[in-house]
Amino acid sequence: MIAEWYKRVSQQPADRPYALFAPGSIDGGPGYAVPADLNSGSAVIRGPWINHELAAQALVFAYDIDELVIAGTLAKAEIWERGYFYASRPQSTYERGASAMFVFEKQPSGEWKILAHEATSQGLPPYKITDPMPDLRALYYQRCGLACDPEKDAAEAKKGW
């Protein structure tokens, strides 16, 4: 269920993650929003929904299940989300983290559904920092395409700030 959740929310736009929710569920995750400057009240010129999930924003995303407790028809999972990004100016990979909590409920059909979800971004505690950081330079410039110049960025990085 957890893998399916992250698969669905990593898409742009998300692939109906709410299909995984149990009846009466609550979601305290980052979700989606319309940019405030485009919200004129008109559905036509309102602008696109933005996916705020770390899984959708990161160049590379990973998660760790820190705790999983199953008690009868309920289960709770504590998840550590890791989003890896690449900064062209300093030519380095950096990491953002979030803590997520899921409560699952076993349905009469035997299927597990999400009863509650909450995710909060936070600073990385020292014991959670990825070391060494993955080198995402090639992936970043592959996805960036013609809009980016890796040689120019590397030369500017050598000059310093």
Image (cartoon, rainbow, N blue to C red):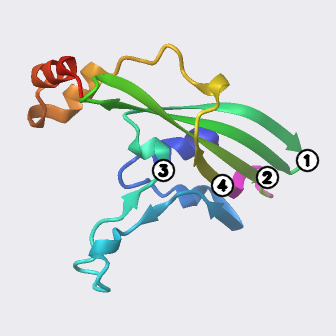
Where residue 79 sits, quadrant-wise, is top right
Q: Residues within 10 Å of mark 4 (few under 14, many from 20)?
A: some
The reply to whether the magenta stretch includes residue 142 is no
Q: In the rendered structure, are the residues bearing label 2 and label 1 in contact, judged by CB atoms less than 8 Å apart?
A: yes
Is 51 on the left-hand or right-hand side of 91?
right
Q: Earlier in the sequence, mark 2 or mark 4?
A: 2
Is 59 on the left-hand or right-hand side of 108?
left
Q: Report the Cα–Cα distance between label 3 and label 4.
A: 11 Å
Residue annotated with mark 1? 72
Residue at 63% x, 62% y is 27
Please give the range of residues in magenta: 108-116
Where residue 22 sits, quadrant-wise, is bottom right
Query: Compared with residue 103, is residue 33 higher up or lower down, i.e. above or below?
Result: below
Residue annotated with mark 4? 118
Is 122 on the left-hand or right-hand side of 87?
right
Q: Amino acid at mark 3?
A: Glu
Q: Amino acid at mark 4?
A: Glu
Q: In the rendered structure, are the residues bearing label 3 and label 1 in contact, judged by CB atoms less than 8 Å apart?
A: no
Q: Earlier in the sequence, mark 2 or mark 3?
A: 3
Q: Quadrant of the N terminus?
A: top right
Q: Report the Cα–Cα distance between label 2 and label 1.
A: 8 Å
Q: Amino acid at mark 1?
A: Gly
Q: Amino acid at mark 2?
A: Lys
Residue annotated with mark 3? 53
Q: In the rendered structure, are the residues bearing label 2 and label 4 in contact, judged by CB atoms less than 8 Å apart?
A: no
Image position, residue 145 (x, y; %): 14, 32
Q: Report the Cα–Cα distance between label 3 and label 1.
A: 30 Å
Q: Quadrant of the C terminus?
A: top left
Residue at 77% x, 34% y is 67
Helix or strand or loop: what does disc 2 sit on? Answer: strand
User: Residue 155 or 80: which is nearer the viewer?
Assistant: 155
Which dot marks residue 106? 2
